[in-house]
Image (cartoon, grey):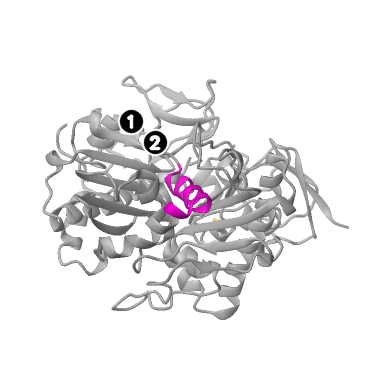
Amino acid sequence: MNFKINIEPEGNTVEAVPGDTLKSVLESGGYYFPQNCGGKGKCGFCRVNYIEDAPKASTLEVKLFGESSDYRLACMHKVESDCTIYVPPLYEAMISGKTIAGFKVSGGRSGFGIACDLGTTTVALYLVNLGSGEIAGQYVFLNPQLSYGADVMTRLNLAKAEDKRKELTNAIYLGLTEGIKKLLNSGEVSPDQIVKLLIVGNTAMTHLFLGFGGEGLERAPFRSPFERRGCIPFNPEKIGLTWEVGCEILPILFSFIGGDTIASIIASDLDTKPGLRLMIDFGTNGEIVLSKQGTIWGCSAAAGPAFEGVGMYSGMPAVKGAVEAFTDEGEPKIIGGGKEPRGICGSGYISGIAYLLKNREITPAGLLKRDKNKKREWIPLLTGDNPPRITQDDIRKFQLAKGAISAGIEILCGEADVEYAHLDEIVITGSFGNRIDISAAVETGLIPRINPDKITFIDNAAGRGAALCLSDDHHRKRALKLRQKMNFINLGEHKLFQEVFVDKMKFPTKY
Ligand code: FES
């Protein structure tokens, strides 16, 4: 007899065969556990909360969550009865709710198109009315490949084994097939109205989507076999659409600069506007692009998913219930209001860490100050029963991410001989949207100290660029011309990278 697992707060139910681990059952129901240790009970990231009748806690669970907590590690417990659990918000498969407010593409064609931003952590689908130019619907979900590893290197390593590579590719095909169904429902459009689909992704996501692994990317000269190509055609039947749908992928520009960066450049007009402009995409793969009077420099920095709240102790996407910032007094600002935060999103971590730096709770090296001679593992920024918290491990992950991004900025500006003070604009894209607190980002050393009026936000830039290229050949041609304009800097091979990275991991010493 199978058991039923009720999942709160959505009220979903998944069935389990007796003896299955809770983690594997939840994953089969679309709940993912990013950055996990592979079910060895070591990382703590597969925690779930039993609403009633929690199984006996292990020594590790007591250490992690406390004696009276009902949190348990899903990988360590077999399902042996019906149960009701609460899955923390980070792991919810669907995180819809993003909008591209007021954004339109050129219309005048018939039918609908789908623009897809295939991210390492999230996949965003936009339904484009090719007649009116309006965005008719959208659906955002966690990339199902997250259960194989949070970063691209882990997934590419796994993909060395043929069976795992196939699993990774199938996971994204299945995710997209389901995602497209939900997208069409949201826009009340039938599949036969779809005439075009355009996918943009970073190099690794593009490789895995096409059934490849890290071919060409693992050793010098680090060239993807998909570089120097036009758009890459793809069989739409693999993701549940009919063969008549014109389906293609924006090309890879240089080894680690993929179609998502091309799309972001198009959306922010970095290739057409004059002056000195810097674009920073705070994704799992942080792309940095600098334009100087029509010439473009670009690099990719392996930031990891910390800015998206993934892998952080209380991390969650920037949706209702997340702490998006802290006031000067340390009060949380919660998305959607309310007094009970569910977790902390990327902008909340930047703001919280800036607050802790200002109050000298963190040293410039990134260590939490000792408490009465005792080493501290986490800081009680919020109150309540098991409240969201910022841990020493979170701070270290944040430092690694900000070190990679700010080292990339410094090296790119050095290569183009540009001083921060002379920049005309910094364009910020990525999952923060316009939530990021600029002064907190400057205080943590994440972005250069420039006049805040020069900073512009473009949320979902890769999705916007994909929609533009999908709807208008003029933008598609702009995208294909970028290769001639760009100088690619491979940070991993740059002689200064290691030194600058280590330096940039430290926090500014102003306090
Ligand atoms: S997956 Fe790491 S503790 Fe469960």
Q: Which quadrant holds the N terminus?
A: bottom right
The front one of 208 and 89 is 208
The residue range painted magenta reads 460-474
Residue 104, percent from left and from top: 51, 38
Residue 470 on the magenta segment: yes
Q: Label 2: few (<14), some or many (≥20) within 10 Å? A: many
Q: Main secondary structure of the magenta part?
A: helix
Q: Amino acid at mark 2?
A: Ser
Could you say where residue 39 lies in the image, as x and y percent from the top left? 58, 62
Residue 233 vertical position relative to residue 79 in the rendered view, above or below: below
Amino acid type of the residue that numbered disc 1 sits on in the rendered structure: Asp
SS at badge 2: helix
Residue in view at x 53 percent, y 34 percent: 319
Quick one: 111 or 403, which is closer to the camera? 111
* Rendering coords of residue 322 (x, y %): 50, 32
Residue 427, horizontal then vertical, whole percent: 31, 41
Q: In the picture provided, is 134 more to the left or to the right than 328? A: right
Residue located beneath label 2 in the image: 347
Residue nearest the viewer, comparing 103 with 60: 103
237 versus 99 height, above or below: below
Q: Are marks 1 and 2 in contact (CB under 8 Å)?
A: yes
Name the residue carrying label 1: 437
Q: Is residue 265 left or right of residue 141?
A: left
